[in-house]
Image (cartoon, rainbow, N blue to C red):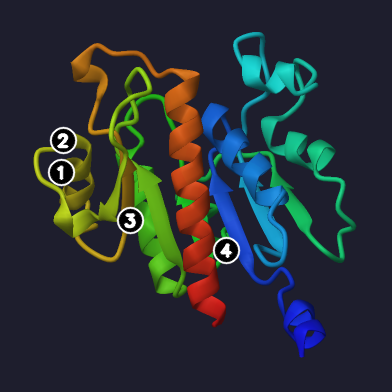
Amino acid sequence: MIQEIEDSRIPKGRIDLIGFGRLGLRIGIHLIQVHRGGPKEIGVFDGQKIDGGDVIFTMKGANIGEYKADFLNKLCTHDENFRKIISVCEDITPDNLDLIKGDVVAIQIAGGNTIPIAAKIIKHAHERGAKTISTAGIFGFGDETIEVKDISEFEDNPAVDELRKEGITENHLIVTTNKLLRDHEPITPYTLDEVAKQITKTSLKLLKDSYD
């Protein structure tokens, strides 16, 4: 009986990471270590190359100039029959949304106004029946309360308000410290560590719900 239960706890499904910077890498490292379950496939989407400012990458052994999306393949030593990394070395745009195949889609893109493309990604994922999660302000020193709840439950978060204006009003999870650029606080490694934990745990629960 125990052996049968153990044999059933194998990786299933796919989690896609849209954006693979300082936060995405942390989430990816967590996901490849999941035991007795978790995703069978992890899709990684990012068109940027690693530079000297990507300290978390170089600390983990990455080379400057290589694509960020390729780096998780280096770190993941699993046999592909157990867990496969699918690297896509390009940014998601309205023209390549069909590349997204995950049962769960975690969005952590940054830089400039990312709301319009995030909304398109969420809508596309929902049309496929996938579950979605994204960030909406993760600034802070590291002792902030991190909230994870549906977009319909938030008040007084401009990033959430902008996403709602794009038509995302329910059935989408938001992870946030409720600190934004306006608050003049940094994004520390401590904050990224805690946000990554929350996104990883939530994504795994969403994936499990899809297959139970």
Mark 2: give few (<14), some (14-19) or many (20+) Cα within 10 Å. some
Marks 3, 2: nearer the viewer: 3
Residue 95 numbered mark, or none: none
Relative side of 129 to 75, left or right:
left
Give the Cα distance between marks 4 and 3. 16 Å
Res 195 → quadrant: top left
Q: Residue furthest bottom?
A: 1
Question: Where's residue 1, x and y in %?
Answer: 77, 91
What element does badge 2 sit on?
helix
Per the image, the residue denoted by label 3 is 173
Mark 3: give few (<14), some (14-19) or many (20+) Cα within 10 Å. many
Question: Where's residue 203, x and y in %?
Answer: 50, 57
Amino acid at the residue labelled 2: Pro
Mark 4: give few (<14), some (14-19) or many (20+) Cα within 10 Å. many
Q: Are marks 2 and 1 in contact (CB under 8 Å)?
A: yes
Residue 208 appearing in the image? yes
Per the image, the residue denoted by label 2 is 158
Relative side of 3 to 176, left or right:
right
Q: Earlier in the sequence, mark 1 or mark 4?
A: 4
Question: Where's residue 87, x and y in %?
Answer: 72, 46
Q: Are marks 3 and 2 in contact (CB under 8 Å)?
A: no
What element does badge 3 sit on?
strand
Amino acid at the residue labelled 3: Leu
How many numbered discs, if any? 4
Q: Earlier in the sequence, mark 4 or mark 3?
A: 4
Relative side of 134 to 32, left or right:
left
- The residue nearer to you, when weighing 145 against 70, is 145
Q: Earlier in the sequence, mark 2 or mark 4?
A: 4
Per the image, the residue denoted by label 1 is 161
Q: Residue at x 19, y 18 (%)?
A: 182
Per the image, the residue denoted by label 4 is 102
Residue 99 appearing in the image? no
